[in-house]
Image: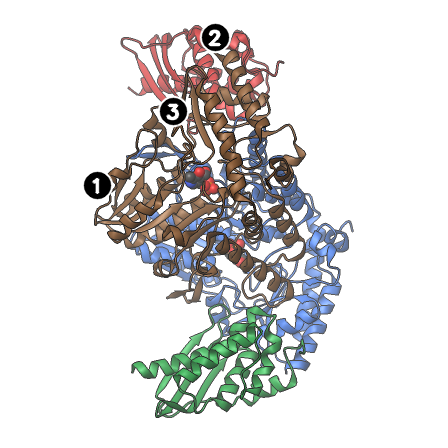
Chain colours: A green, B red, C brown, D blue
Amino acid sequence: MSDDLYQQALLDLAKAAHGAGTLPSPDGEALRDSPLCGDRVRMQVALEGGRIRAIAHDVKGCLLCRAAASLLGLHGAGLDAAGAGALRDRVAATLAGSEPPPGWPELKLFEPVRPHRNRHGCVLLPFETLLAALDSQTRA
Amino acid sequence: MSDDLYQQALLDLAKAAHGAGTLPSPDGEALRDSPLCGDRVRMQVALEGGRIRAIAHDVKGCLLCRAAASLLGLHGAGLDAAGAGALRDRVAATLAGSEPPPGWPELKLFEPVRPHRNRHGCVLLPFETLLAALDSQTRA
Amino acid sequence: MSFSAAKWRDRFPLLAAHPGLHYLDNAATGQLCEAAFDAVTHHDLTHRANVLRGTYRLAEQADAAYENARQQVATYLNAANAEEVVFTAGTTAAINLVAHAFGEGLGAGDEVMLSLAEHHSNFVPWQMLRARRGVVLRILPLAPDGRLDLARLEEHLTPRCKLVAVTHASNVTGAVTELVPIVSAAHAVGARVLVDGAQAVQHGPVDVQALGVDLYAFSGHKAFGPTGVGVLWGKAEALEQLPPFLGGGGMIGRVTPGETTFAMPPRRFEAGTPPIAQAVGLGAALDWLQAQPWADMHAHTARLAQRLLEELAVLPGLTFLGPRDLRNRLPIVSFNLDGLHPHDVCQVLDRHGVAVRGGHHCAQPLMDFFGVAGAVRASLAPYNSEADIDALLAGLKDAMRKLG
Amino acid sequence: MSFSAAKWRDRFPLLAAHPGLHYLDNAATGQLCEAAFDAVTHHDLTHRANVLRGTYRLAEQADAAYENARQQVATYLNAANAEEVVFTAGTTAAINLVAHAFGEGLGAGDEVMLSLAEHHSNFVPWQMLRARRGVVLRILPLAPDGRLDLARLEEHLTPRCKLVAVTHASNVTGAVTELVPIVSAAHAVGARVLVDGAQAVQHGPVDVQALGVDLYAFSGHKAFGPTGVGVLWGKAEALEQLPPFLGGGGMIGRVTPGETTFAMPPRRFEAGTPPIAQAVGLGAALDWLQAQPWADMHAHTARLAQRLLEELAVLPGLTFLGPRDLRNRLPIVSFNLDGLHPHDVCQVLDRHGVAVRGGHHCAQPLMDFFGVAGAVRASLAPYNSEADIDALLAGLKDAMRKLG
Ligand SMILES: Cc1ncc(COP(=O)(O)O)c(C=O)c1O
Ligand SMILES: Cc1ncc(COP(=O)(O)O)c(C=O)c1O
């Protein structure tokens, strides 16, 4: 495990910013602040049969946060609420030391964040905002 | 200077309780609590031409406080307000390290209290209550 | 028996350095244990930085140390969750926090029940709340031995009661409060229960879940930890319902000149830079205490207290404040000697190397109940020994001779 | 020149033990000086006891040490009287004390004036007061460089203003507030002035009498003292007019279930066991600081800050938050690099052994004013050296290469 948080692959993922932008008519949407650093993520989802058809996000945040959002833009389609919740938990577990879940190879990029507990929130924020966006849809 | 707070002469002075009791029709009266130990002194004065003619006190307090009140009972007559104020200051100065004022030989008994700063208030309380009693008279 | 008071004493640097000191003022402040001393030193020499969001190593270490302390406190209290532990400046600060945060939800006619045995720190904040919001204070009376009179609970605990705030143990009589009936009666009328644990935690781990209480406060300095730190524990759902008390850095979500949102507990209640090194020291003290042989230690202090009670009882003119037996009671013994003022007695005891406190012990309503202005109090910790009791008794006899 | 940064650094045990550490987060927390460390250790090992009315030697020593610390603070602030010094848990606690005690006398329509540059600790307590009592908050705007816009003082300081609460120096821009015109304008309308000195006292002794302010707050941990302690200084006549804030032991005259009377300042404001050892440590820190060659030290830190400002200014995409010159300004430098997030920058700097902080620095209204979410902040103390600036600049270049 490299101790370097900022591997080239993580930088590339962040800068690719998969899913950045807005959806024309989202089914769900949420805005979340990081309570302590002022970072902010907006997530929009379009759904089909309870599953995510499309994701769009707008991130004012650090590279870790941007990479996490980009990862969701890349692979989020197809998740339902339960799947998104499980994913969030698996990401948290990965940060706490578990092996990343199969099928999400990019999560390996966050392993070096483990010892930096104050940065865990940066990685988790997009996942949590996605959950909130799905939840907003349920309640609408 | 003896380090012993409780010299026989001090005990004798306290137990003599000169001036303990009440005056039939006092010209001034005050009740003072020690803010931190709950001790309580009541002082009454009868005046003549602005000077103390008679003193009476009721003390719920420690031996130091009782000895100080007794000393006032013994020698307080004849003081006016200015004299009582000056006396209070001289007693405070004695506790702080100065020589006791002439004419009050018993104040020497309080010299061993000097290093015990938490007890200075015990000695001063009767003097302060006397001032308050004189002041109550002025205002009446 | 695996416990040795002499060996325990050696774990307290001040006591180890002062072999002639008979320290019997533990209810005022316990001596600092080596574990806490070392933890604070280590923290200040290797991990000192502000907490929250620092991204450099030192700050990460400071954060980890601070949150580890939170976990150590949670473990000692058997809290469900470390997030239920709020660090404060002490018991007094913790109780005032509740009086304000919980108190903001109360209004005229709402009731708060206390007992007559409370320390000023669990009395005055409620009087001040009464002045601010018009709540009614109900004061549970005491049985003649100073224990809370539970027979009169029903009479004082009305459906208008929103909070019961009682001490876990009296700092004057040592009487331990029977919390279980109080908690069930309080919960039956929908009231929360805040317990002042300032005198309890230093006598062994506490199980807040088993007690069933909602909020629990204590101080570091009485639990062999540093001054400047204390704890408010609260059930997660109880804390979540409380608005913040103090405003400042660290307790907010977002601040604009117009509006501010607040963080989740425990942070919501920790405005400003917390007592970081002191919390680390307290955590270390409790972690160390947790591993001690408490059954042996209780037997040891009870034996000393029993002897003290017995030998005092035969002194002429002696009156106790509080129960005369040791059932459900801490090794705290308060008394008066007829005609002798507590401060004079303590002063003479000091010349015997005996440190005890005289005065009202910040419990004037309880003093009034006993009809005295003050008392002499000897309060024991596991490091005390027969020699301390010997010195106390010899000193008392000397005081009676000298002052009588 | 009699000042050597390297020798000064050796008086800070953590820094002496970590020669590779470039600690530039002094505005968050200063490192603990040896004087404070030794004083706390000495106190806990030789004088630990509760304060107030203990009549045994240890308690007398604890009292004397605590009151001596009060005098040391008074001397550092040039206060008229040690009784004007109230020990608190920190700046945040001190400001909240004023917001409650002074705030209780305010009502709807009364005004409190702040500035837009305030730390959350001098913002949120007033917002909470507004919510409690309906006072109006007036926010003095800033000039483009982040300094308080004194030209607009008259417009915001109305005859309804009862209190002006402003920072002595910004924790983000380093700008030092010109207090004299503010104080005279405030006093002209009958308002009191509370100054948040959290960033000021660590840069040399303060003269509260010369400043003419009424109340002054600061924290121990930023002034090279312990965590867990702070100070509210107040003019005697200002403190005497304030009701108590927290209730508990030590701050009362007499307590009965019906009524309670309160002690005189400073005790009226020190409910419960104070942070005794921490106050002793803070007193020792200030006593030591008082004797330092401040003119040389100011020249030293100004030279470092000047170099930092100059070398940063030429980096591509760099923007400063705050004045670009050092006139009337502390050695605190906040900035952003275009496209780089402060936390990412700080994390790379950490790998260079450079400890700086990134984020909103508990000053979100000020961040909003500058139109940013956060910034990187390097804050200097006299122990910093050219080597620290070298490491910071090298690290920044690395961060630009790595993250850009
Ligand atoms: C200007 C200013 N005011 C107030 C505070 C709050 O100080 P503390 O967190 O020590 O209470 C700080 C420090 O964070 C500050 O920089
Ligand atoms: C029962 C009780 N409650 C509260 C307190 C107040 O604790 P502190 O002074 O540490 O805030 C004390 C100690 O003095 C106490 O004995």
Residue C388 vertical position relative to residue D94 in the rendered view, above or below: above
Looking at the rendered structure, whether the residues under marks 3 and 2 are on a common chain is answered as no
The reply to whether the residue tagged 2 has its Cβ within 8 angstroms of ligand 2 is no
* Tag 2 secondary structure: helix
**Spatial distance from mark 3 to mark 2, Cα to Cα?**
22 Å
Q: Residues within 10 Å of mark 3 (few under 14, many from 20)?
A: many
Residue drawn at (21%, 41%) of the image: C155
Q: Is residue D150 visible?
A: no
Q: Residues within 10 Å of mark 1 (few under 14, many from 20)?
A: few
Q: Is residue C288 left or right of residue D123?
A: right
Q: Chain of mark 3?
A: C
* Tag 3 secondary structure: loop
Residue bearing mark 2: B13
Q: Pointer 3 and pointer 2: residues touching (CB < 8 Å)?
A: no
* Tag 1 secondary structure: helix
Q: Chain of mark 1?
A: C
Label 1 amino acid? Answer: Glu
The reply to whether the residue tagged 3 has its Cβ within 8 angstroms of ligand 2 is no
Q: Which mark is residue C155?
A: 1
Instruction: Give the position of the C terminus of chain D as an image quadrant.
Output: bottom right
Q: Nearer the viewer, residue C286 or C51?
A: C286
Residue bearing mark 3: C373
Q: Nearer the viewer, mark 1 or mark 3?
A: 1
Label 3 amino acid? Answer: Ala
> Picture coordinates of residue A103 (x, y %)?
53, 88
Looking at the rendered structure, whether the residues under marks 2 and 1 are on a common chain is answered as no
> Picture coordinates of residue D69 (x, y %)?
58, 38
Q: Nearer the viewer, mark 3 or mark 2?
A: 3
